[in-house]
C-alpha cells in the first residue's frame, strides 16, 4: 500500500512538472566592454530539459532576422572567438566572445523554443567602447561674406557618446568669447574679417585620443588700405619709395595713380607687389631720379568684388637727400661723379655741398674768383689757399 502511494505521488509530481511552462530565470545584465576584451552572457532556464535553447544575435536593422549562434549545447557560428558552455547543475547556457570587435556590439537573445510559434526569450545588450569618429555631415570649410551669420556644425559617433568642443588655432579667442565652446553647433551671429582662420572641432569620450577636424573659415571683405608713411620728402634727382599696405579677400587689384593717371613701370617709376598671405598685400612704387613734376600726391587704390578703397601718399621736396633709398645712388655735379654707398660718404657729400655754397657766396661778393670742378683734390687745394689768405 505504501508503495502504491509513493508511485501515485511520483506520477502526480511528474504531471505537474510536465504542465509547467519553461522559463528563463536569469539573463546577464548589459555589458560594456573595450575592443579586444572578453565577454560572457549567461542564460539560466527552468522546466526546459526537453526544449532547445538558442542563442542569437539580433540585427538592429532587421529585427525579425536574428543570426543563430548556438542550438542547445552546440555552437552553430564558425568563429573561433565564440564558445559555448552548459552548466548542468545551474541549467545555465554560457556564451563567450573573445577579442571583442566593434561589430560585435548589439543585442544577444536567449530563446527557449516551445513550439513552432511559441517561445520564451530574453535579451542582453553588448556595448563596445569606440573612439570618436567625426561624421561626414560635419562642416568642412566655409567661404562667407563679412557681416553674415555663420553656423559651424560638428557631429561624431562613438561609445560613450562623444562630447564636442570648439577651439581656434593658437587658442585665439572665439567669436562667442573665451577660448573653448562646448556643443555641436558654433553660432557666430555676425562674422568679421578678424574671425577668419582655422577652427578645431574636437570630439572626446575617454576612449583613445579623441578626434579633431580642422575647419577653415574664409571671410570675404572689401579692401582696407593703410599707408605706413603718408608724407615723404626727398631731394631732386634722388629716388624715393612710397608704400601701401592692403588687406582684402578675395585678393584685390591694386593700382597707383598720380593726377588721376594710372602709373606703370617705366624709366620714371618701378612698382612692386608682395603678397604676404591670402588677405595681405604690400605694394611699393619707387619714384626714380625725382623731377619737379613728380612731387605731389600719389593714390594707392585697391578693388575687389566687395568694394574699393584708397589712400594717399604725399611726396614733397627736401634740400637734403633722405637715406634710404638715396644710399647707393650716384650723384651728378657738373662733370664730377660721386658714388654714395654708406653713411660716412653721405656726410662727405653734404660737407662738399656746404663748402661749395660758401665758395659761391664769396665769389658773389667779389672776394675771390675761381673756376673749379667738384673733386676732393680741388677742394683740398681751395682750403689751403683760404688758410694762406688768412
Image (cartoon, rainbow, N blue to C red):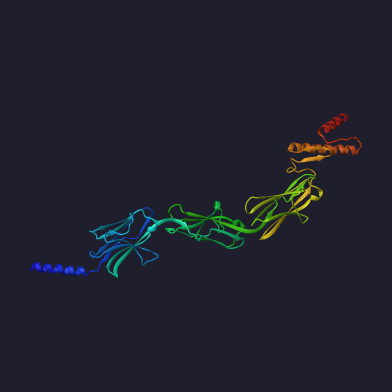
Which residue lies at the image location 83% right of the left edge and 33% below the top edge?
Answer: 379
Q: How many marks?
A: 0
In the image shown, does 79 or 276 lie closer to the viewer? 79
168 on left or right of 336: left
374 on left or right of 24: right
200 on left or right of 323: left
Q: Position of residue 148 (x, y in %)?
A: 60, 63
Q: Position of residue 129 (x, y in %)?
A: 40, 56
Q: Position of residue 61 (x, y in %)?
A: 40, 65
36 on left or right of 219: left
Q: Residue furthest front?
A: 78
Q: Position of residue 367 (x, y in %)?
A: 91, 35
Q: Residue furthest left?
A: 1
Q: Residue furthest right?
A: 366
Q: Quadrant of the C terminus?
A: top right
Q: Quadrant of the N terminus?
A: bottom left
**Residue 161, picture quadrant:** bottom left
Which residue lies at the image location 81% right of the left edge and 33% below the top edge?
Answer: 376
**Residue 160, picture quadrant:** bottom left
Which residue lies at the image location 64% right of the left edge and 52% below the top edge?
Answer: 280
Amino acid at each position: 500500500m505504501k508503495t502504491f502511494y509513493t508511485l501515485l505521488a511520483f506520477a502526480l509530481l511528474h504531471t505537474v512538472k510536465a504542465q509547467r511552462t519553461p522559463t528563463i530565470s536569469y539573463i546577464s545584465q548589459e555589458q560594456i566592454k573595450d575592443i579586444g576584451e572578453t565577454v560572457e552572457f549567461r542564460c539560466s532556464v527552468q522546466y526546459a530539459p526537453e526544449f532547445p535553447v538558442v542563442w542569437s544575435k539580433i540585427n538592429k536593422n532587421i529585427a525579425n532576422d536574428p543570426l543563430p549562434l548556438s542550438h542547445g549545447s552546440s555552437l552553430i557560428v564558425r568563429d573561433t572567438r565564440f564558445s559555448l558552455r552548459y552548466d548542468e547543475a545551474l541549467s545555465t547556457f554560457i556564451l563567450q566572445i573573445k577579442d571583442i570587435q566593434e561589430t560585435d556590439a548589439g543585442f544577444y537573445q536567449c530563446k527557449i523554443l516551445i513550439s513552432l510559434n511559441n517561445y520564451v526569450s530574453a535579451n542582453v545588450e553588448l556595448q563596445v567602447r569606440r573612439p570618436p569618429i567625426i561624421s561626414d555631415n560635419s562642416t568642412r570649410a566655409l567661404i562667407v561674406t563679412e557681416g553674415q551669420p555663420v553656423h559651424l556644425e560638428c557631429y561624431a559617433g562613438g561609445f560613450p557618446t562623444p562630447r564636442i568642443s570648439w577651439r581656434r588655432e593658437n587658442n585665439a579667442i572665439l567669436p562667442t568669447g573665451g577660448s573653448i565652446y562646448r556643443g555641436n553647433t558654433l553660432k557666430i551671429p555676425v562674422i568679421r574679417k578678424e574671425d577668419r582662420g582655422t577652427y578645431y572641432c574636437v570630439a572626446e569620450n575617454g576612449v583613445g585620443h579623441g578626434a579633431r577636424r580642422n575647419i577653415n573659415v574664409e571671410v570675404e571683405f572689401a579692401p582696407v588700405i593703410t599707408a605706413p608713411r603718408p608724407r615723404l620728402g626727398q631731394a631732386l634727382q634722388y629716388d624715393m619709395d612710397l608704400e601701401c599696405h592692403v588687406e582684402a579677400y578675395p585678393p584685390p587689384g591694386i593700382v597707383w595713380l598720380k593726377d588721376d593717371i594710372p602709373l606703370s613701370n617705366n624709366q620714371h617709376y618701378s612698382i612692386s607687389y608682395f603678397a604676404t598671405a591670402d588677405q595681405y598685400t604690400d605694394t611699393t612704387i619707387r619714384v626714380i631720379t625725382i623731377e619737379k613734376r613728380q612731387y605731389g600726391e600719389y593714390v594707392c587704390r585697391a578693388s575687389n568684388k566687395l568694394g574699393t578703397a584708397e589712400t594717399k601718399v604725399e611726396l614733397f621736396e627736401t634740400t637734403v637727400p633722405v637715406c634710404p633709398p638715396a644710399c647707393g645712388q650716384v650723384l651728378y655735379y657738373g662733370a664730377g661723379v660721386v658714388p654714395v654707398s654708406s653713411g660716412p660718404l653721405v656726410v662727405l657729400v653734404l660737407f662738399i655741398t656746404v663748402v661749395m655754397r660758401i665758395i659761391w657766396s664769396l665769389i658773389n661778393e667779389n672776394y675771390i674768383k675761381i673756376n673749379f670742378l667738384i673733386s676732393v683734390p680741388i677742394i683740398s687745394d681751395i682750403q689751403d689757399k683760404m688758410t694762406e689768405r688768412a
